[in-house]
Amino acid sequence: MRHWLLFAALLTLTLIGLVTSLTSGSLSVSLYEVWQALSGEGSGLEQRVVLELRLPRSLTAFVVGALLTLAGALMQVLLRNPLADPYVLGVSGGAAVAALLAMLAGLGGLLLQGAAFSGALLATLLVFTLSHGRGQWTTQRLLLTGVVLAAGWGALISFLLALAPGTQLPGMLFWLMGDLSPARFTPWPLLLLLAGLAMAPFLGRSLNILVRGELQAQALGLDQVRLRYLIYVLASLFTATAVTLAGSIGFVGLVVPHLTRLLIGSDHRILLPASALLGGSLLLFADTLARTIIAPQQLPVGVLTALIGVPLFLVLLQRGRN
């Protein structure tokens, strides 16, 4: 019953965030006008704003937040480190380098997203290949390889920014800080999120065993190697998709799994879908603030998630220490 009440509260929070996102902005739209636009009965500027601008951006914000949170929860299990986040293995760095190269080449839209996704997959392949090598694949080797490659990607990003012309530099910086303003909703990220949520009840039991240690997992007959590969592939795919849609948005995948554990415990069958709902709602509210706090100008949503995530994480850290 407690879990059902929690999911009801999270669904309500998501609905509130969606309504707030659709009605708020430089142009105020009433709830009735939103309903008319969604039902196809509206007309004029309000309908265009809701259907062409705010609804695609709101859905993208929710999907990106949920994917980052799922990736963060999986990474923390894979690396057995509560400070692991979706970007720790340099996936976002590879996506950023490819996206900046596409921007320098004058590409945009789907070509830019395709370049970012290709860069993220390339980074994933490099980490996977180099960490495996000729020896046994371990979480320590994976983490060290990811950290080193992330530093390399960071150096390439700085090099590209130094070469960028002044006219393209603001857009490149906005993308690096996390920007949902060019978001155009496409169904495949939502399908990926739904597939991940559908796997949660089946994957969660194995994750619960894995976090208890290698000896207990081995005693219970869990195939740890195959499970780690699956976790790594899923977390990388979720991260690559989120970075492709919105750039680098920090702290969502780090803080939200911690907060969800405080609410419901460490049962990953419940933790994964609950944290996805909470992460999506958090990014919805953050994006709404980014659009309205200094309207008509907009802030990169990654700036607000950092401003929210840093103090919240410090509070959670102090509570855990106590």
Image (spheres, grey):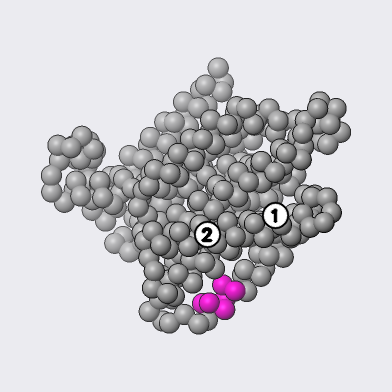
**Magenta residues (range):** 156-161
| Whether residue 121 can be seen here | yes
The residue under the point 44% across, 50% down is 286
Residue 268 at what x, y percent from top left?
64, 31
The residue under the point 68% across, 65% down is 149
Residue 306 higher or lower than 172, as above or below: above
Q: Nearer the viewer, residue 128 or 286?
A: 128
Q: Nearer the viewer, residue 177 or 319?
A: 177
| Residue lying farthest to the top in this orientation | 1
| Whether residue 28 can be seen here | no
Residue 117 at what x, y percent from top left?
51, 57
Residue 198 higher or lower than 55, as above or below: above
Instruction: Name the residue tied to disc 1.
Output: 128
Residue 186 covered by magenta stretch: no
Question: Type of residue at label 1?
Answer: Phe
Compared across the picture, whether 143 is left or right of 171 comes to right
- Magenta segment's dominant SS is helix
Question: Type of residue at label 2?
Answer: Ser
Residue 160 covered by magenta stretch: yes
Compared across the picture, whether 291 is left or right of 221 comes to left
Q: Secondary structure at mark 1?
A: helix
Residue 321 higher or lower than 172, as above or below: above
Instruction: Name the residue tied to disc 2.
Output: 118
